[in-house]
C-alpha cells in the first residue's frame, strides 16, 4: 500500500477501512477497504480527518473485486435479469418479472470449482417474484488475476446462461370438479377457495368450471367440452385414489390423452397426474389439494405456466426433497419442499 494525499486519491482504491465517529450517536465504517475513491468522497474523508489515505495499487493483469463482480454477474445472468451492486464486491442478481427460476446446477458447480470465485443461487424451478434476489456472486480476495474472470466468462459463453427466469404465460384454464356429492349439492364445492385462489396467485384465471359425476364417460364429456371451448390447461380435481368408484383417470384415458405420469414420489400429492391431449395439458389433482396448503400441484403448475417441459425423469428426481414437513405455518417456496 502507498500513502497518498486525500485530494490526490480520486480513482484510487482504499487499502483499509475508514471509520467515522459522531460523538454520542455513531461509530462505524464510512468507507470500506477496496472502495474506489470518487470526487464526492474527498470532502467526507477530510471531514472525518483523513487528510491522507493508504491506497491499494492493483498490478496490471489483476482485477478489483467490484469490477470482477460485475463481469461475473453478466456472465452468469440472462440478459433480462437485473443486477444490483457491487456492494463490498458482491453483485446480486434479481428477477425481472414473476416466473420460474431456471438454474444450471452443473454449471454452477463448475464455476465454484474455480479458485477465488463464488456463485450462490436459489434452487432451480423455484417460483419467483419480480425484484426477488435469485443469486449473488463475487471473488473471494480483494483482487484476482484477470485470467480467472476470463475463464469464467469463456465457460459461460460456451453454454446457455446458468441463471434465467421463464415468465409465466397467460393460459386459458378450465376445470372439471368431480364427485357425486358435489353434483348433488350434498357438500359445498371448495375449488374456488383452494385451487382457484392458487391459480390466481400466478396471475391466471379459471375461465370455466364444470362439474362431473364419478363416472368416466361424464368426466370425458366435460373434458371434451372444455377442449372445444379453447382451453389450453384443464384441472381435474379429485377421483384419483385407488377407490373403485374413482373415475378421473379412466375419464382422461377415454378422451385419448397421453398419460405422462400418474403417481409421484411427492407427499402430499402421490396420486397426482399429468397428461397431454394434442397440445392441451391436463393436471389431475388428488383430493389433498383441498386441505394441504402445499402439494405436488405447487411444483408442477408454475412449470406449465412458464412453458417448461415436465418429463417422467424429472418427476422421479423429486423423491429427494419431495416429502413435505407440513409445518404449522407454510412458507413455501421458502423451504426445501420439491428441491
Image (cartoon, rainbow, N blue to C red):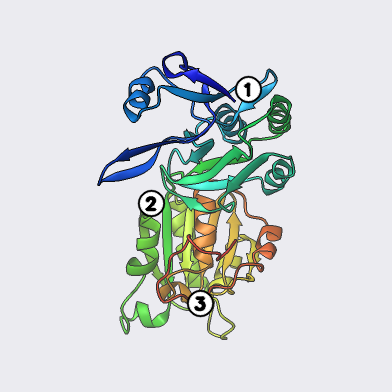
Where does residue 137 sit, x and y in percent of width and height? 58, 40
User: Could you tell me how far apart the alpha carbons at marks 1 and 2 are, in whole angstroms?
Assistant: 53 Å
Q: Which residue is mark 1?
A: 58
Where does residue 184 sit, x and y in percent of width and height? 33, 81
SS type, badge 3: loop
User: Which comes before the other along the chain, label 1 or label 3?
Assistant: 1
**Quarter of the image with the N terminus in it:** top right
Most extreme residue toward the left, as rendered?
24
User: Which comes before the other along the chain, label 3 or label 2?
Assistant: 2
Q: Which residue is mark 3?
A: 239
Q: Give me the residue at 31% from left, 78% from top.
A: 188
Category of crowding for the residue at label 2, using alpha-carbon neighbours closer than 10 angstroms: few (below 14), some (14–19), many (at least 20)? some
Figure check: 335 above or below 269: above
SS type, badge 2: loop
Q: Nearer the viewer, mark 1 or mark 3?
A: 1
Category of crowding for the residue at label 3, using alpha-carbon neighbours closer than 10 angstroms: few (below 14), some (14–19), many (at least 20)? many
User: Which comes before the other along the chain, label 1 or label 2?
Assistant: 1
Q: In this view of the protein, can residue 83 be seen by the observer?
A: no
Q: Which mark is residue 204?
A: 2
User: Could you tell me how far apart the alpha carbons at marks 1 and 3 are, in whole angstroms?
Assistant: 68 Å
Q: Give me the residue at 47% from left, 78% from top.
A: 214
From the viewer's side, name the closer residue of 128 and 27: 27
Amino acid at each position: 500500500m502507498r500513502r497518498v494525499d486525500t485530494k490526490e486519491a480520486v480513482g484510487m482504491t482504499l487499502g483499509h477501512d475508514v471509520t467515522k465517529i459522531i460523538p454520542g450517536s455513531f461509530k462505524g465504517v464510512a468507507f470500506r477497504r477496496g472502495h474506489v475513491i470518487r470526487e464526492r468522497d474527498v470532502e467526507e474523508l477530510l471531514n472525518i480527518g483523513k487528510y491522507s489515505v493508504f491506497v491499494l495499487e492493483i498490478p496490471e493483469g489483476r482485477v478489483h473485486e467490484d469490477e470482477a463482480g460485475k463481469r461475473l454477474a453478466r456472465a452468469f445472468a440472462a440478459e433480462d435479469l437485473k443486477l444490483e451492486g457491487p456492494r463490498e464486491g458482491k453483485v446480486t442478481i434479481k428477477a425481472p418479472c414473476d416466473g420460474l427460476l431456471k438454474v444450471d446446477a452443473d454449471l454452477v458447480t463448475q464455476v465454484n470449482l474455480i479458485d477465488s470465485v463464488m456463485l450462490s443461487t436459489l434452487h432451480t424451478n423455484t417460483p419467483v417474484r419480480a425484484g426477488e434476489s435469485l443469486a449473488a456472486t463475487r471473488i473471494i480476495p480483494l483482487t484476482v488475476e484477470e485470467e480467472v474472470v476470463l475463464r469464467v466468462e469463456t465457460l459461460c459463453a460456451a453454454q446457455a446462461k446458468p441463471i434465467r427466469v421463464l415468465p409465466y404465460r397467460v393460459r386459458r384454464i378450465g376445470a372439471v370438479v368431480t364427485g357425486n356429492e358435489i353434483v348433488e349439492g350434498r357438500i359445498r364445492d371448495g375449488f374456488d377457495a383452494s385451487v382457484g385462489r392458487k391459480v390466481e396467485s400466478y396471475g391466471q384465471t379459471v375461465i370455466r368450471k364444470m362439474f362431473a359425476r364419478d363416472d368416466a364417460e361424464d368426466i370425458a364429456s366435460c373434458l371434451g367440452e372444455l377442449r372445444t371451448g379453447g382451453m389450453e390447461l384443464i384441472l381435474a380435481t379429485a377421483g384419483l385414489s385407488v377407490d373403485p368408484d374413482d373415475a378421473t383417470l379412466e375419464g382422461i384415458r377415454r378422451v385419448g390423452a397421453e398419460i405422462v405420469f400418474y403417481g409421484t414420489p411427492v407427499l402430499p400429492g402421490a396420486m397426482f397426474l399429468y397428461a397431454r391431449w394434442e397440445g392441451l395439458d391436463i393436471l389431475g389433482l388428488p383430493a389433498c389439494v383441498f386441505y394441504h396448503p402445499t402439494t405436488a400441484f405447487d411444483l408442477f403448475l408454475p412449470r406449465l405456466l412458464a412453458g417448461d417441459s415436465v418429463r417422467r425423469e424429472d418427476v422421479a428426481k423429486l423423491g429427494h426433497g419431495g416429502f413435505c414437513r407440513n409445518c404449522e405455518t407454510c412458507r413455501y417456496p421458502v423451504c426445501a419442499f420439491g428441491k
